[in-house]
Image: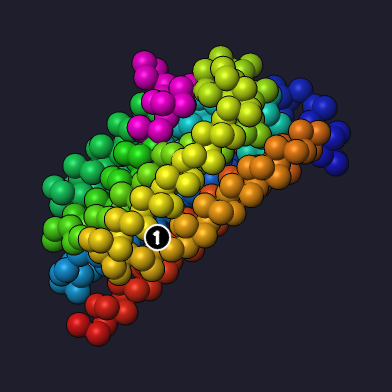
Amino acid sequence: MNSAAYLSVPVSARMTGLRRHTAAQTARLCWAEARPSVQLVFLLRFAVGTVSAPGLPQAAGRIVLGMAAWWCAVACAYLLNGVTDVREDRANGSRRPIARGDLPVRTAAVVTALLAVAALVLGGLAGAGVLGWVVGFLLLGWAYSASPVRAKESSGLCAVVVFGLGATSYAAGVAAAGSGWTATGAVFGCVMAAWMALVGSVVKDLGDVGGDAAGGRRTVAVVRGVAAARVLAVAGAVLVAAAGTAAAAVWAPLALVGTAPVAAGAVWVVFRVVWDGRRESADREQRRGAYRAFMVTQYIANLLVLAAFGAALSAG
């Protein structure tokens, strides 16, 4: 069956078919719903936190447990987001499993709860420090998607919560290593959390205005219009690039390995925001160029800093 014919089948009929899926198939659907590319970048943030702190060789077991806990927490938060975003995702034409009717909301909700329990258990095994950050991340994930906060519905609240989701990821890695922050780790972690809050949280909405409005969201793009959201995205990208590079140069030169790609990525994001703004007739995926630029930039920045910290540890 082609995609058009598939989507013409009532959602209830497609969900009924899912009851015949095996546990492994359901797990794969949940994994896909929780956005693998996002899961991976959160684990990269955790890994950067671990190598930014001294004591890495002595904490290998705690780090493995902590990373497993962090993956469960991230998957929980993003699966919860899928559970609470059904109306908007379908209006926006999302191809994720819940929106297309392959994964029942009730099934996803049960898996979300199991992932939260697993994150807490594994976090506890990794130590009190990691457990504390896991709890914080889970609460932020709930605040982003669910009542009473539903931060996703407001650009301001969204930015605050998203900053917290990024910062706790680096902090959990530091806690797993069993040591304190270094200046380099603190500067880079703050810059990347700001990149998420001031850039990612804005550009992610540029291709989803219709569905967000249908879902009752009050983001800048919905309330003030897409043009205002583009201005905000450009301002955020320029601010993070300039402030991040300056902070690294003054307090943590090694962090320039990561903040320099962020500055380059900011130019890319600005270009895509302007370019995509001239293509209002484009489909959703074509309008998400700025978001893809944001994502690729944070992958590159985190990978380069991870490699730099790893080289420094080996040399030490």
Front position in the image: 312 or 14: 312
Residue depicted at 36% across the width and 33% down the height = 161
Residue depicted at 15% across the width and 69% down the height = 55
x then y, percent, for residue 91: 68, 24
Q: Is residue 131 left or right of residue 76?
A: left
Magenta highlight range: 146-161
Q: Is residue 290 left or right of residue 153?
A: right
Quarter occupied by residue 309: bottom left
Name which residue type carries label 1. Answer: Thr
Q: Which residue bears the numbered disc 1? A: 259
The chosen color scheme is rainbow
* Picture quarter with the C terminus: bottom left
Q: Is residue 175 left or right of residue 202?
A: left
Other-residue count near label 1 (Cα within 10 Å), few / some / many at <14 / 14–19 / ≥20: many
Q: Is residue 150 magenta?
A: yes
SS label for mark 1: helix
Quarter occupied by residue 137: top left
x then y, percent, for residue 4: 85, 35
**From this viewpoint, is residue 208 visible?**
yes
Chief SS of the magenta region: helix
x then y, percent, for residue 13: 73, 25
Front position in the image: 1 or 315: 315
Residue depicted at 27% across the width and 78% down the height = 312
Number of labels in the image equals 1
**From this viewpoint, is residue 68 visible?**
no
Which residue is outermost to the bottom? 315
Give above or below for 19 relative to 188.
above
Give above or below for 254 relative to 232.
below
Front position in the image: 51 or 196: 196
x then y, percent, for residue 108: 50, 33
Residue depicted at 13% across the width and 61% down the height = 179
